[in-house]
Amino acid sequence: MGQLCSYFNQQPRPLIGFQISSSSLSGVALSSKKRKTRDSFVFHFSDDTIKPSLYNKNIGDMDRLKDIFKEGLSEMGEVDRKAALILPELSQKTFVFSFKTIPASYQEKQKIIRFRIKKVMPIIPDDLRISFDFMDSDGEKVAVVTAAREQVVKEYEEFFKDFGIKIRVIVPPWFGLMNLVASHSQKNFMMINADKDSFSLVIVVDMRLAFYRQKHFLFEDDKDIHGSTKAEKMAKEIMGTIHFLEDREKINVSCIWMRTGIRKGDEIVSYLRENCDFDINRIEDSPVLSFDRREKKILAPLIGLLL
């Protein structure tokens, strides 16, 4: 698994983690000796309790979120006070940049990465916080970059601080999912993470991140103006991305791994299986996950991050 997994394993690995999305709040606690799942909780909400955004305030109903979290903590018993957090997909950005050469100092690396971000983001907040690492790929240096606004990060950090919990590491959902997929997959694959308000695509080539795409995509209205279901439209978006990568970037994938935290997940997987030649795998079917199927869909990113 090479550099892909070494990049992941550099991150702190607390014994407890939480995940927030536009439709749920969940938590997982591990035992300290064997790092096996000890307790967990999943709470769903359909209102505007959380409104994921890179630019704006995320927590829409603080009192509601606190009530949910109190109940979740009560189900977990005594927990470690240092935790990991998985942000909503739309509260952060991920970038994959290639460079012929890179400077030696951290400050200069920051400068060239921020310069590249400015080329692809029309509006860059002044308080954008970035994390990055470099991997070697065919004579080039590939930077994997995650970015989120300071005010959004602090909003979540302050929420957990009110419960005596310090957030040690903050990552996007794909980060945890990749740990579940990388050890079971071929060298070239696509990973898809779909939630109520968005989906993301990650392409891995020779066990290195090669491409990332995030798209705002509401699944609430089932039909679009052409009569296609939202599940069909999303599947077509995925297939279009695959064809683009094959034609323009000369990137080929051998299989697809998919996690769908939405009720239309089965329809998306069925459409893909009927219309493309790839093996389609459900991330929630990973043998690492020992929960019921509904909980697996929600908890998969957290389990991958902590284990």
Image (tube, helix red, strand yellow):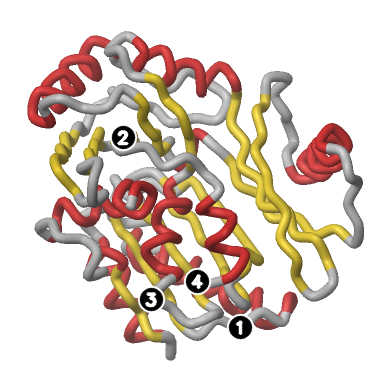
| Gap in angstroms between the C-alphas marked 1 and 3 | 18 Å
Q: Position of residue 232 (x, y in %)?
A: 36, 68
State the separation of the CA atoms marked 3 and 2.
Answer: 24 Å
Residue hosting label 2:
18
**Residue appearing at x 87%, y 38% in the figure:** 105
The secondary structure type at the circle numbered 3 is: loop
How far is disc 4 from disc 2 in space, using C-alphas? 25 Å
Picture coordinates of residue 53, whole percent (x, y) = 49, 30
Among the two numbered marks 1 and 4 on one chain, the one whose residue lies closer to the N terminus: 4
- The mark that comes first in sequence, 4 or 2, is 2
> Image height check: is 30 above or below 73?
below
Q: Residues within 10 Å of mark 4 (few under 14, many from 20)?
A: many
Residue 254 % position (x, y) = 50, 85
Residue designated by label 3? 184
Tell me the kind of residue under disc 1. Answer: Asn
**At x 68% / y 49%, what residue is drawn?**
133
Depth order, front residue of 91/174: 174
| Residue neighbourhood size for the residue with mark 3, other residues' Cα within 10 Å, grouped as few (<14), some (14–19), many (≥20) | few
Position in image of residue 161 (x %, y %): 36, 13
Q: Nearer the viewer, mark 4 or mark 2?
A: 2
Question: Rounded to the nearest whole Å, what is the CA distance between mark 4 and mark 3?
Answer: 13 Å
Q: Is residue 170 visible?
A: yes
Taking depth in this image into account, of 95 and 60 the one nearest to the observer is 95
